[in-house]
């Protein structure tokens, strides 16, 4: 097939047409069970939807094509997809993860993974020497990366990390939820496994929970093991969610680019705001990882940014309570912008700075978003000035 751009792949949902009806939009097929032939064998290769459902086929094929993988599996949530990769490991296996990462995974490792016999080292994965030093030859089976990583948006050089990992015989898995394949395609840089929370940008409308795993070429056994894990642990997506996900992904490229453009404008505006201590966005020249981001990301730096507020945790929470266009809520990657005091959402041992707010930029006009943050910051600045005088 001619190589097509991601925009084209997504907008056309791979150009699929229903063979029975010539319908251009995919049908939803909720059937749990599939007819067997007279000798009691599955006629279509399908038997029961916990194992596979025809509604999965198109969104899986589209995510796989966007990531340049050899196969994709949808899961009931991003967490279910991620955990399937760890469930394939054995007691005694060692994994390396970033110090700052999606906190749900850190919690799973610390609460369940360690109890089941995994060992884990958290390092600064952005520095290849740190990553190298964390690898235990013969024991390290998996290097986990997130780039840009929650919630400070640091960038890992994927090719450099893959070189370290592969030399030691470890696989590299990348949580690509934040960048999406529109901005970064980890398999092109050598990654073995790519993960998504489809609940974020892939679906993009904040109305479903889903996850996906993509494996690179040469990992057929891994793919079939993950499919068995999905079936046997029951981590399957609903057919309606699979259908809705495909619909959402048709506009993926437009949404991600618009959010990235607006995020850069918002980040620049925040940099020049008195109450802001520091803006963390890989698109800013001031971000320590900007050079790697500029090399590795294409078409933008994503819709996620964070900023630290002078006056600490209390002032940060005050800012979040005063926004009017942004919504104070968890999650990201939807059409509306949200703001969150992230450390407050994470466990007490979280390394997330307590004076930091995390922002997901949606599809609103940048002027409205900037004005909203400015009015909230100005109001808190005035409050602080007043209390200073009273002291
Ligand atoms: C939300 C998120 C997850 C978990 O996905 P769910 O769909 O909520 O289970 C994993 N990784 C990252 C980076 C996320 O943002």
Image (spheres, helix red, strand yellow):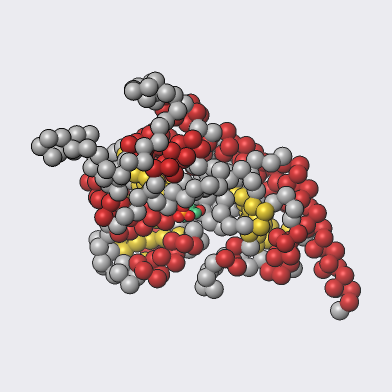
User: Measured from the top left, where is residue 340 in percent x and y?
Assistant: 63, 59
Question: Quick check: can you spot residue 16?
Answer: yes
Left or right: 150, with 188 as reference point: right
The residue at 87%/70% (across/down) is 386
Left or right: 343, with 192 as reference point: right
**Residue positioned most to the left:** 39
Q: Quadrant of the N terminus?
A: top left
Question: Quick check: can you spot residue 162?
Answer: no
The residue closer to the viewer here, 130 or 356, is: 356
Q: In the picture, residue 55 is in which quadrant?
A: top left
Left or right: 245, with 319 as reference point: left
The residue at 39%/20% (across/down) is 22
The residue closer to the viewer here, 260 or 56, is: 56
35 is higher (above) or lower (below) than 200:
above
Q: Quadrant of the C terminus?
A: bottom right
Left or right: 179, with 95 as reference point: right
The residue at 59%/53% (across/down) is 288
338 is higher (above) or lower (below) than 215:
below
User: Measured from the top left, where is residue 380 in percent x and y?
Assistant: 80, 63
Q: How many marks?
A: 0
User: Measured from the top left, where is residue 385 in percent x and y?
Assistant: 86, 68
The residue at 19%/34% (across/down) is 43
**Residue positioned most to the right:** 389
């Amino acid at each position: 097939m001619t190589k097509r751009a991601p925009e084209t792949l997504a907008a056309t949902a791979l150009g699929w047409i229903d063979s029975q009806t010539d319908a251009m939009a995919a049908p939803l097929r909720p059937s749990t069970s599939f007819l067997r032939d007279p000798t009691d064998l599955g006629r279509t290769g399908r038997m029961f939807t916990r194992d596979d459902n025809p509604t999965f086929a198109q969104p899986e094929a589209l995510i796989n094509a966007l990531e340049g993988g050899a196969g994709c599996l949808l899961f009931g949530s991003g967490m279910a997809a991620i955990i399937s990769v760890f469930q394939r490991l054995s007691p005694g296996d060692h994994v390396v993860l970033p110090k700052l990462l999606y906190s749900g995974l850190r919690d799973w490792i610390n609460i369940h993974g360690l109890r089941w016999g995994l060992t884990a080292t958290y390092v600064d994965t952005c520095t290849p020497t740190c990553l190298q030093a964390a690898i235990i030859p013969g024991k390290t089976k998996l290097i986990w990366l997130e780039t840009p990583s929650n919630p400070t948006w640091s960038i890992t050089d994927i090719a450099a990390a893959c070189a370290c990992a592969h030399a030691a015989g470890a696989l590299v898995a990348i949580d690509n939820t934040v960048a999406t394949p529109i901005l970064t395609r980890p398999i092109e840089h050598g990654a073995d496994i790519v993960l998504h929370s489809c609940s974020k940008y892939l679906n993009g409308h904040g109305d479903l929970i889903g996850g996906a795993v993509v494996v690179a070429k040469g990992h057929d056994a891994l793919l079939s093991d993950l499919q068995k894990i999905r079936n046997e642990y029951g981590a399957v997506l609903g057919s309606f969610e699979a259908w809705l996900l495909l619909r959402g992904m048709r506009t993926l490229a437009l949404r991600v680019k618009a959010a990235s453009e607006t995020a850069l404008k918002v980040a620049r505006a925040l940099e020049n705001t008195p109450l802001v201590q520091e803006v963390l966005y890989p698109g800013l020249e001031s971000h320590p990882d900007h050079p790697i981001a500029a090399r590795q990301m294409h078409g933008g730096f994503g819709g996620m940014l964070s900023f630290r507020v002078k006056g600490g945790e209390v002032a940060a929470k005050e800012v979040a309570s005063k926004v009017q266009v942004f919504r104070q809520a968890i999650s990201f990657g939807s059409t509306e912008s949200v703001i969150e005091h992230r450390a407050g959402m994470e466990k007490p041992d979280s390394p997330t700075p307590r004076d930091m707010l995390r922002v997901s930029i949606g599809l609103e006009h940048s002027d409205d978003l900037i004005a909203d943050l400015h009015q909230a910051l100005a109001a808190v600045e005035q409050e602080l000035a007043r209390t200073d005088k009273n002291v």
